Image (spheres, grey):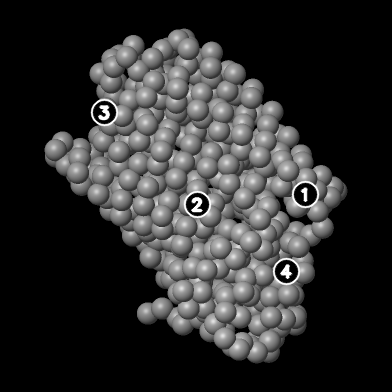
Amino acid sequence: MFKSRTASPDPDAGQRFEQHKGLRAMYYHPVTQIIMLGFVCFLCPGMFNALTGLGGGGQMQATTSANSTCAVYATYAFFAFFSGTVNNKIGAKWTLFLGTFGYALYVGSYLAINIHPDAGGFVVGAGAALGVTAAFLWTAQGSMMLSYATEAQKGVFISIFWGIFNLGAVVGSAVSFGQNFHSMDNSVENGTYVGFLILSLIGVIIPLLMADPDKMIRTDGTKVVTPLQPSWKSAFYNLWVSIVSDPMVLLLFPMFFASSYFYTWQFNDYNSALFNIRARSLNNLVYWLAEIVGSIMIGVVLDNACFSRRARAFAGWSILFITVFVLNIWAYSYQKTYTRQSIPPDAQKMDIYDSAYPAHIWLMILYGLLDAMWQTTCFWLIGTMSNNADKLAIYVGFYHSIQAAGAAVVWRMDAIGFPYMVMFVFSWCLVAVGLVMGFPMIYLRVGQANVLDDKVILKMKLEPRENEKQICLHVE
């Protein structure tokens, strides 16, 4: 089923290739494949985001959902750390395919608990299974998204993908809002989960229809550099080699850790805590709509050819820094007015027709903008460190592993009942630390374009391999 990855010399190294003709040209075009990739994540992680964004997975009691989400990220954190080597072994297409299965199972578990309230163990188990498969999906996604683009296209490709991906959460949120528009309850109906389940099952099929990355040609005529085939032992060793060869990536780890940490406060401790299901659904809808806008906005900044790449990196960092502090000062003015004890799950909560609602929904909109800008900037910074799919897969694995570790910690904190104010302050501090730690990496590492990386890789692929150790060291 899986295509073997070969490490044989590449006779086409350094050449420019004629693009495909006719319908094949459309099918094999990098933008077409990025759009298809976006729809995979539209239908699978997009539904997961729509479900999570409701707060408590759409349930009245958020504890089971928080424990399940903790299980997602705990298993994700482990498997994402090594998923780059899995991607290099079996290829991005098949890694992506394997990664889709857990999403349908996870959505189905919420339908089960809505019908059978004692099915909480199934929800947590489905979360653990999803963590394994999601690690594969996101590593394959990152490798494809960054390696299909030329140097000048990385920000645009990230934005195209991020816009389509977040449209999935928008559609899922719209389904939820429509299903629950006339409801004043604090939980969703079965029809919402059924709709999510059907969409996520469609997402399992799309990777089978995508092109083999080995046949892809970039828009500048160069072939996509495909991963080598080291042994499993040397593949795991490459994780260490990638850090030793470029230790600047360590400065991005705090940004990676914070990149999903703030979701818990936004969705469970703000959206679920303060609003009824109708308002929660609308908040969720506008949040993910704002994500699309945010990814486009920051993509324009990061790919603006009028400025050097270094200037664009500093501009992106500055936008994040200002936005983080403005929004969190605003959010603090709300957080200090309520506690976990003052608003029980079955309380009468804020509705869309309440006078205080407009100001509160604007905070959700702007948090959606911030999240998209944060994620896009992280991927863009990773893309500045290499053009090689092998190394990018490992870096993306680092990103998702560390991101998931942070999320696992914070979702467990929420499940055991940490005060809302503690959750909020921790979230604010972590994003601030991430920006401060990331600044030296931008200052010291982001400079001239890394266009030589692929040429070095291709040259290495022509050199004879005397032993496995030599293959292992060919990360660069």
Q: Which circle's residue, 2 or 1, is located before the other in the chain?
A: 2
Amino acid under label 1?
Leu
Q: Quadrant location of residue 54?
A: top left
Nearer the camera: disc 3 or disc 2: 2
Labelled disc at residue 453 = 4
Within 10 Å of the Cα at label 2, are there few (<14), some (14-19), or many (20+) other Cα atoms?
A: many
Q: What residue lies at 61% left-to-right and 38% top-to-bottom?
A: 434
Q: In this view, does 235 lie above or below 182?
A: below
Viewer-proximal residue, 466 or 387? 466
Q: In which quarter of the image is the N terminus?
A: bottom left
Q: Is residue 320 above or below residue 93?
A: above
Labelled disc at residue 444 = 1
Q: What residue lies at 59% left-to-right and 69% top-to-bottom?
A: 390
Q: Quadrant location of residue 368?
A: top right
Within 10 Å of the Cα at label 3, are there few (<14), some (14-19), or many (20+) other Cα atoms?
A: some
Nearer the camera: disc 4 or disc 3: 4
Looking at the rendered structure, the secondary structure element under dot 1 is helix
Q: Decide: marks 3, 2 in contact (CB < 8 A)?
A: no
Q: What residue lies at 74% left-to-right and 75% top-to-bottom?
A: 455
Labelled disc at residue 61 = 3
Amino acid under label 2?
His
Labelled disc at residue 400 = 2
